[in-house]
Image: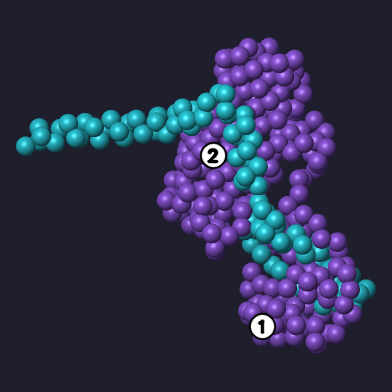
Chain colours: A purple, B cyan
């Protein structure tokens, strides 16, 4: 299927929330195009929904809607439009990429997934979290430290990280007011040539709803360890992992890593 | 009658009170300071999405609808448009 798409189609995906008429971030021209595509689908009596795979003609008019098996719909469309096969018109590239950030910011990449596979557990969930200088200065001590010394992360900053510690769910409201209790505490292990290495221990207790718009939030608990490495006045490197985590009765794991500045 | 259950009840209360404490200290107690750096590094690496879970990235995706239509016209190719609630590229949908 990937081969067929790359060889004979132009592919595009959108998030409906970006195209929402009330506050979506997509430009009005983009929103108008989606509206037109929907209207053309209705006119053709296609089963247009919010989560839909549309087949459009090369000039962008609604032709069909993909129904299982997807490959058969693609092949029918190819047969109808007879495109000249070739290379992908857009080069494939990682679709989960770090957002732009200031040079002195810390970019964190989070991967979370339930222990289950199939359905919601099939693909991992990812988030990108940017800690600007003013943020990361709140998780490292402003003074020299010695082995054994401990401190707690600023709660506002740790909340901005821990709020994404939930498995794949349809609801992705990650507002920090879901958090009931949280703590990330660091303890210096070594100080070598100005480089401080500290272990991090912590936990999270919050409520998270699986489906958007519902009120049946399930308790979520996670135990966390990690490593924080830093030198004076430089962006730190932070890694965190869950040692045990459950949303309701669903176990899940999380890993957070700092993306090296060279890789951004 | 109640007396014979009291020790069990006490144990239950103690267990309930201590459970969060035990859970919180579990990781600290099981991964020593000497091992924590390598263990965390290894665990972070193990939890990165494997390539078979990133096949979505093997498709060339246009950035938006208008660009897709422009490319469709230029290359005479039909267009697949996926409309999704949330971020399909990060699995948060």
Of the pair B86 and A237, the residue shown nearer to us: A237
Tell me if residue A122 can be seen.
Answer: yes
Q: Position of residue A59 (x, y in %)?
A: 86, 78
Tell me if residue B87 can be seen.
Answer: no
Q: Position of residue B85 (x, y in %)?
A: 64, 62
Q: Secondary structure at mark 1?
A: loop
Q: Secondary structure at mark 2?
A: strand
Please tell me the numbered disc located at residue A242: 2
Q: Is residue B54 above or below residue B83?
A: above
Number of numbered discs:
2
Q: Position of residue B30 (x, y in %)?
A: 47, 30
Query: Label 2 lies in what chain?
Result: A
Residue ID at (64%, 56%): B91
Left or right: B55 in relation to B14: right
Residue ID at (61%, 53%): A124
Spatial separation of the CA atoms under disc 1 and disc 2: 45 Å
Q: Position of residue A131 (x, y in %)?
A: 71, 34
Q: Mark 1 or mark 2: name the one nearer the start of the chain.
A: 1
Q: Is residue A207 above or below residue A91?
A: above
Q: Quadrant of residue B73?
A: bottom right
Left or right: A256 in relation to A35: left
Per the image, the residue denoted by label 1 is A46
Dots 1, 2 in contact, CB < 8 A: no
Disc 2 residue crowd, few under 14, some 14–19, many 20+, Cα 10 Å: many
Which image quarter is the C terminus of chain B in? bottom right
Disc 1 residue crowd, few under 14, some 14–19, many 20+, Cα 10 Å: some
Left or right: A221 in relation to B52: left
Residue ID at (87%, 77%): A85
């Amino acid at each position: 299927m990937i081969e067929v798409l790359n060889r004979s189609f132009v592919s595009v995906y959108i998030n409906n929330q970006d195209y929402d008429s009330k506050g979506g971030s997509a430009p009005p021209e983009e929103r108008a195009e989606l509206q037109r595509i929907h209207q053309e689908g209705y006119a053709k009596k296609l089963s247009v929904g919010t989560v839909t795979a549309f087949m459009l003609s090369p000039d962008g008019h609604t032709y069909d809607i993909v129904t299982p098996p997807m490959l058969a719909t693609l092949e029918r469309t190819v047969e109808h439009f007879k495109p000249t096969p070739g290379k992908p018109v857009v080069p494939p590239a990682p679709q989960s990429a770090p957002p732009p950030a200031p040079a002195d910011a810390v970019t964190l990449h989070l991967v979370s997934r339930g222990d289950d596979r199939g359905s919601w557990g099939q693909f991992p969930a990812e988030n990108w979290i940017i800690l600007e200088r003013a943020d990361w200065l709140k998780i490292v001590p402003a003074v020299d430290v010695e082995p054994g010394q401990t401190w707690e992360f600023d709660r506002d900053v740790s909340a901005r990280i821990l709020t994404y510690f939930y498995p794949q769910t349809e609801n992705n409201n990650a507002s920090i007011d879901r958090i009931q209790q949280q703590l990330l505490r660091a303890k210096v292990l070594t100080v070598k040539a100005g480089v401080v290495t500290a272990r991090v221990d912590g936990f999270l207790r919050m409520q998270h709803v699986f489906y958007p718009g519902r009120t049946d939030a399930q308790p979520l608990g996670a135990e966390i360890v990690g490593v924080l490495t830093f030198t004076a006045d430089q962006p730190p490197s932070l890694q965190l992992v869950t040692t045990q985590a459950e949303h309701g009765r669903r176990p899940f794991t999380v890993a957070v890593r700092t993306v090296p500045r060279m890789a951004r | 009658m109640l007396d014979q259950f009291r020790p069990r009840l006490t144990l239950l209360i103690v267990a309930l009170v201590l459970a969060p404490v035990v859970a919180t200290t579990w990781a600290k107690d099981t991964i020593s300071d000497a091992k924590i750096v390598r263990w965390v590094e290894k665990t972070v690496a193990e939890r990165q999405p494997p390539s078979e879970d990133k096949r979505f990235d093997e498709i060339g995706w246009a950035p938006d609808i208008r660009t897709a239509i422009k490319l469709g016209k230029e290359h005479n190719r039909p267009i697949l448009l996926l409309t999704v609630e949330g971020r399909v590229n990060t699995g948060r949908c």
